[in-house]
Image (cartoon, rainbow, N blue to C red):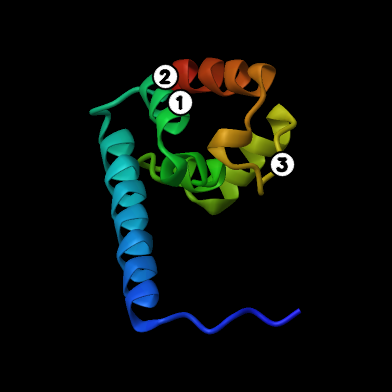
Amino acid sequence: MALRELTKEERDTARRKALAARVERADLKHEFGSGAITFDEVLKRAGGSEAVARLKTLELLESLPGVGRVTATKVLEDLGISVNRRLGGLGVKQRRALKEYLAELG
């Protein structure tokens, strides 16, 4: 099934929406990495924002100082969380495990 051709206005609207989502996720990662907001606040934002809910948990962990892709991947594997899991898809036990891990860091 072929997708219908979008009008110029629809493409422009989609571009603006995508840009706003990328900016929102980048700001959140910066705030979290600098310690301006906590993991609980991140989860609260994920509940109210589709853009934040679609942020990969791996990317959020990588925003922490001294945590790269290898470390973040190892942490998620140790906690039993898929590296492809997004914030909005984290279960209660996964949220608790991440919260405890982050509490040990800080």
Q: Quadrant of residue 64?
A: top left
Image coords of residue 36 (percent x, y): 23, 28
Quadrant of the image for the N terminus?
bottom right
Residue under pointer 3? 82
Q: Relative to 22, is 104 on the left or the right?
A: right
Instruction: Check disc 3 and report its element: helix, strand or loop.
Output: loop
Residue at x 49% of width, y 46% of height? 55
* In the rendered image, the vertical position of residue 14 relative to residue 24, given as above or below: below
* In the rendered image, the vertical position of residue 105 relative to residue 21, given as above or below: above
What distance separates the C-alpha of mark 3 from that of mark 2?
A: 20 Å
What distance separates the C-alpha of mark 1 from that of mark 3?
A: 17 Å
Proximity of marks 1 and 2: CB atoms separated by less than 8 Å? yes
Residue type at numbered disc 3: Ser
Residue at x 39% of width, y 73% of height? 10
Residue under pointer 2? 40
Among numbered discs 3 and 2, the one appearing first in the sequence: 2
Residue under pointer 1? 43
Instruction: Check disc 2 and report its element: helix, strand or loop.
Output: helix
**Badge 2: few (under 14), some or many (20 or more) residues near its Cα, within 10 Å?**
few
Image coords of residue 68 (percent x, y): 48, 50
Image coords of residue 87 (percent x, y): 54, 36
Q: Relative to 83, is 69 on the left or the right?
A: left
Instruction: Check disc 1 and report its element: helix, strand or loop.
Output: helix
* In the rendered image, the vertical position of residue 63 relative to residue 22, given as above or below: above
Q: Quadrant of residue 60?
A: top left
Q: Nearer the viewer, residue 79 or 87?
A: 87
Q: Relative to 57, is 26 on the left or the right?
A: left
Residue type at numbered disc 2: Asp
Among numbered discs 1 and 3, the one appearing first in the sequence: 1
Q: Nearer the viewer, mark 1 or mark 3?
A: 1
